[in-house]
Image (cartoon, helix red, strand yellow):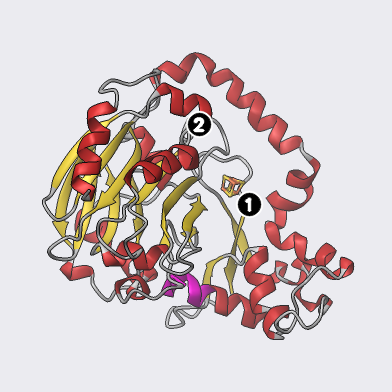
Amino acid sequence: MSIRDRVATLVAELPQEPQYPTQGATLFVDLERRDIARGYTPMRVVKALLAGRGANMFYLHRLLDESLEPLHPDIPLIFGSGVLTGIVPSAARGNATSWSPESGVLMDCNAGDYFPSFIRMNGIDHIVLYGRAAAWTLLRIRQGDVEFLDATPYLGLDNIDLRERIPSDLGGTWNRDLAMVNVTRAGENLVLTSAIMGGPKACYARGGPGAKMGSLKVKAILVQGQTRDFETAQPYKGYNRTIAQKLLETSVVKHALKTMGTPFLYRPSRMLGAMGTKNNQETTWTDKLDAENITPYRSGMAGCFRCPVNCRPLNELNQDPADKYGRGDGPEYVTLGKFGPNVGIDRVESVIRLNNICNDLGL
Ligand code: SF4
C-alpha cells in the first residue's frame, strides 16, 4: 500500500473536529503533489499516549512501511507538540519522528526553542511530511495555512546565514512572530549525522533527521505571523505563575540550571568517574572544563518559549565581527563532554568554538 493510500485510510478514520478545546490539527503534507489533508488525533490515542512523541508514534505506526529504506519518500517525517505545549511554563519542547537513516530503526528526537509552541498557537499539533518535493521547498505556515515557497535561494546556507536571511527576505522577528525548523548543507547532502535545527542551537539531532528532511527536499518549515493565546486556557493562567514559581524554587534550577545551564553536570560527572574520556578509555578528566571556567565567556542566558528557567548559556569568545564562531549559543553538558574529555581537549575556548561551529553546520 502506498503512503497516499495509508494517509487516505487514516484521515478517513480521524475526527475532523478538535477533541478538546486546545487541541490542534494534524496536517498531512504531500510534498510531491502539494496536497494537504487534516484531521485530529483521536481522544483514545491522546488518553493512552498523550500528544507530542506519543501521538507521533501512533502516526508512524499507522503510516510506516518497514520494507522501505528510511530515506524513501513514502517514509514520513513527523513533527509533534504536546498537549500542554505553548500553554504551561517550560512545556516548550517538541519531537521529530521517523525511521532512522542512521540506525535503520526508530528515529525520535526532542528539541525546544519556539517552533513547537508556535505551531500549536497556529492551531497545529502535528505535521506529517511525505513524498519528495519536485524542487527544494520552504513551507510557510501563517494563521494555520500552509504555503509552498521556492527554497532555491536558500540552498547552501547553514544555520547562522539562513537565520539572518529569512527575516530580511520574508519579514518577522525571531521568537516574537517567527520560528523555524531547517536543514543546513549537511541535511541537503544527506549526511547521516545531520540535525534539523530548531533555533540557533536547539536541534533534533539523533538518528539523522537532517538527512531525512533533506531527502524530502524540504529546506525549512517557517511559522510566521501573529500567534494567538489559547482562550480556553485563560481561566487557568493564574496556575502558570504558581507552576513557574515552583520550578524556580527547585534547588537544581535556582543554583545551577538558571545560572550556568547543563554544564553544571560536568563537575559531578568528573568526580564520580562517570565520563567517557578519550573515546571511553578513561572515566574522568580535567577540572579546567568545570562550568565555573565557562563563566568568563558566558554572555547571558536564553530559553525556550515562555520558560522561566532560561537554561541556555550564551557564549562570547571575542567581539570580532569577522569571527563567525566568536559567539553563539551553548555549550550544553553533552557537547562539553564530547568535545572535551571524549576527544581529549582541555581548553574551554576550543570546546566553545567547536560547539559554535557544529550549531552552524547543523551537526
Ligand atoms: S529553556 Fe531549558 S528548561 Fe526551559 S524549556 Fe527550554 S530546555 Fe527546558
Q: Is residue 218 above or below residue 345?
A: above
**Which residue is at 61% across, 40% downward?**
308
**Amino acid under disc 1:** Cys
Task: Residue at 42% x, 83% y: name it.
Answer: 322
Q: Nearer the viewer, residue 4 or 342?
A: 4
Residue at the right extreme of this rendering? 271
Residue 214 picture location, percent across and down: 30, 66
Q: Secondary structure at mark 2?
A: loop
Q: CA distance from mark 2 to mark 1?
A: 25 Å
The amino acid type, in three-letter code, at marker 2 is Leu
Which residue position holds label 1?
A: 311
Q: Which residues are magenta?
A: 356-363
Residue nearer the viewer, 295 or 273: 273
At 29% from the left and 53% from the top, the residue drawn is: 221
| Residue 239 among those drawn in magenta | no
Q: Which residue is mark 2?
A: 50
Question: Residue 22: image x %, image y %?
Answer: 40, 23
Q: Are marks 2 and 1 in contact (CB under 8 Å)?
A: no
Q: Position of residue 170 (x, y in %)?
A: 21, 55
Looking at the image, which is closer to me, 91 or 322?
91
Main SS of the magenta part reads helix
Mark 1 lies within 8 Å of ligand 1 (Cβ measured): yes
